[in-house]
């Protein structure tokens, strides 16, 4: 790898020159360090938009891409600020975690390289060069410092991308060799094909596909700190504990990246319903606390697929709500919400259109929304609403009048749409 004038090589200091040691370049880097979160977030967004292989609906991928960009830009700017040579850099943990996640998602490594190039171009043209221009007065000097900045930035990218690629390759090799990869491929076949031999698949999975299945998704919120050496073991241990709480005679666990897992538990429909308080206690004991989304218990291979699809929809609803961990959510409790949130942006537009000023998060508006929601829940009866809220009927009527004033139309209009919008609002503002 090429060395640059003024970059400190291991064991000795290069002579000073108009490159990394320049006051202007170091000053520009110092100024940008205060904006690393903003810069990294913008880089991640641009990278996700221009890398079609990345699933922008994958909350774990999106969060880790952002963490990786922020950590990378912070490291790069700090290196420039303090004269650290590109050859001495090591990728931050978040960048390596992102490489491992891409490996587990089977993303083409060329897509990772392209995403880094996109992010780097956005950083250089949108942030680094403008910062240099602001810190260098003479145009001829600007050219010198920008040239040095580009050389250093390119070398930093070479160094980091080389290490990230190596991490990806190592992770993929582990997955390909491991039992998780084989089981993942087989589970994908079961989920997508009716032509599979169910008895043979059951033997290979060591899980009876002919039973009654309760599908679930277990995950740690993006951004939570996990022990990279034990994250899979932690999730599998927690999954086994949850299987016991569910009264399952057999549990199939399929890790999905470093902080989530799909699972199926074989259950007996004759047994009592799940004790969600016990589930929450188990999820609370996890470090960090975890989320669990559950489908409905359904028999056979068709049930294996259906319960899993329900768990995924419940998972999406919980992620959209921002519910803090620990949480245990059954699909039956969020079936309507999950349907409405299949397009989150459209759902928010619908809420704004139906409720208008009532969506404002002032405390008084929250009270008004709650009153209107209870009013609709109680067949639009002020008397029943007053009993449900423990309020005087006149107080309920006053609040309903305020709702009409804010809505601009009688509350008897668009009752179904407004009721749905209120349900959505309560979920999205948790």
Image: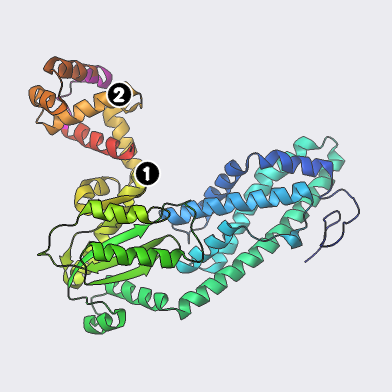
Q: Identify the element where label 2 is drawn.
A: helix
Q: In this view, does 98 lie above or below 252?
A: above
Q: Identify the element where label 1 is drawn.
A: loop
Which image quarter: residue 131? top right
- Is residue 330 something one can see in this rendering? no
Labels 1 and 2: the sequence-earlier one: 1
The quarter of the rendered structure image containing the N terminus is bottom right
Direction right: furthest residue: 15
Query: Few, some or many C-alpha atoms within 10 Å of disc 1 (few <14, some 14-19, many ≥20)?
Result: few
Tell me the residue at 36%/66% (across/down): 237
Q: Where is residue 374 in the image (x, y as percent from the top left)?
A: 17, 30
Q: Indicate left or right for 8 with 404 as reference.
A: right
Q: Where is residue 32 in the image (x, y as percent from the top left)?
A: 68, 41
Start-end of magenta stretch: 403-415
Q: Indicate left or right for 391 with 294 as reference.
A: left
Residue 103 or 136: which is nearer the viewer? Answer: 103
Residue 397 or 349: which is nearer the viewer? Answer: 397
Residue tagged 1? 322
Query: Few, some or many C-alpha atoms within 10 Å of disc 2 (few <14, some 14-19, many ≥20)?
Result: some
Q: Does the magenta stretch include residue 414?
A: yes
Tell me the residue at 28%/74% (across/down): 190
- Is residue 421 something one can see in this rendering? yes
Q: Is residue 153 magenta?
A: no
The quarter of the rendered structure image containing the C terminus is top left
Badge number at residue 365: 2
Residue 303 or 292: which is nearer the viewer? Answer: 292
Q: Where is residue 28 in the image (x, y as percent from the top left)?
A: 75, 41
Q: Indicate left or right for 294 with 17 as reference.
A: left
Distance between mark 1 and mark 2 Cα atoms: 21 Å
Tell me the residue at 83%/41% (across/down): 23
Which image quarter: residue 158? bottom right
Q: Indicate left or right for 152 with 182 as reference.
A: right
């Amino acid at each position: 790898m090429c060395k640059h004038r003024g970059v400190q090589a291991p064991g000795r200091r290069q002579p000073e020159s108009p490159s990394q040691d320049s006051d202007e370049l170091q000053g520009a880097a110092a100024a940008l360090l205060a904006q690393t979160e903003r810069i990294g977030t913008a880089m991640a967004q641009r990278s996700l938009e221009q890398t079609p292989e990345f699933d922008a609906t994958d909350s774990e991928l999106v969060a880790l891409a952002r963490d990786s960009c922020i950590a990378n830009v912070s490291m790069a700017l700090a290196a420039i600020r303090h004269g650290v040579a590109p050859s001495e850099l090591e990728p931050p943990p978040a960048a390596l975690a992102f490489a491992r996640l891409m490996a587990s998602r089977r993303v083409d490594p060329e897509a990772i390289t392209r995403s880094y190039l996109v992010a780097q171009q956005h950083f250089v043209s949108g942030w680094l060069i403008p910062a240099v221009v602001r810190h260098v007065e003479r145009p001829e000097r600007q050219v010198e410092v920008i040239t040095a900045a580009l050389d250093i930035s390119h070398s930093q990218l070479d160094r980091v991308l080389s290490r990230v690629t190596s991490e990806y390759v190592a992770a993929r090799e582990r997955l390909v060799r491991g039992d998780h990869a084989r089981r993942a491929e087989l589970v994908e076949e079961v989920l997508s094909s009716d032509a599979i031999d169910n008895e043979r698949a059951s033997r290979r999975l060591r899980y009876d596909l002919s039973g009654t299945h309760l599908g679930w998704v277990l995950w740690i919120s993006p951004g939570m700190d996990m022990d990279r050496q034990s994250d899979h073991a932690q999730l599998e241990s927690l999954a086994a504990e949850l299987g016991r709480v569910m009264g399952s005679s057999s549990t199939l666990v399929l890790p999905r990246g470093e902080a989530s897992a799909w699972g199926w538990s074989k259950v007996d429909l004759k047994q009592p319903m799940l004790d969600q308080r016990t589930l929450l206690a188990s999820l609370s004991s996890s470090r960090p606390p975890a989320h669990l989304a559950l489908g409905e218990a359904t028999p056979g291979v068709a049930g294996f697929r259906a319960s899993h699809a329900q768990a995924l929809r419940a998972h999406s609803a919980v992620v959209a709500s921002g519910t803090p961990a620990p949480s245990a959510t059954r699909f039956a409790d969020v079936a309507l919400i999950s349907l409405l949130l299949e397009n989150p942006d459209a759902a928010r537009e619908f809420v704004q259109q139906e409720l208008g000023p009532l969506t404002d998060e002032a405390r008084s508006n929250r009270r008004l929304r709650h009153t209107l929601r209870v009013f609709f829940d109680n067949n639009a009866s002020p008397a029943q609403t007053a009993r449900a809220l423990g309020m005087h009927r006149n107080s309920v009527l006053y609040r309903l009048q305020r709702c009409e004033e804010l809505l601009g139309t009688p509350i008897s209009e668009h009752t179904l749409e407004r009721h749905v919008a209120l349900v959505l609002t309560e979920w999205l503002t948790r």
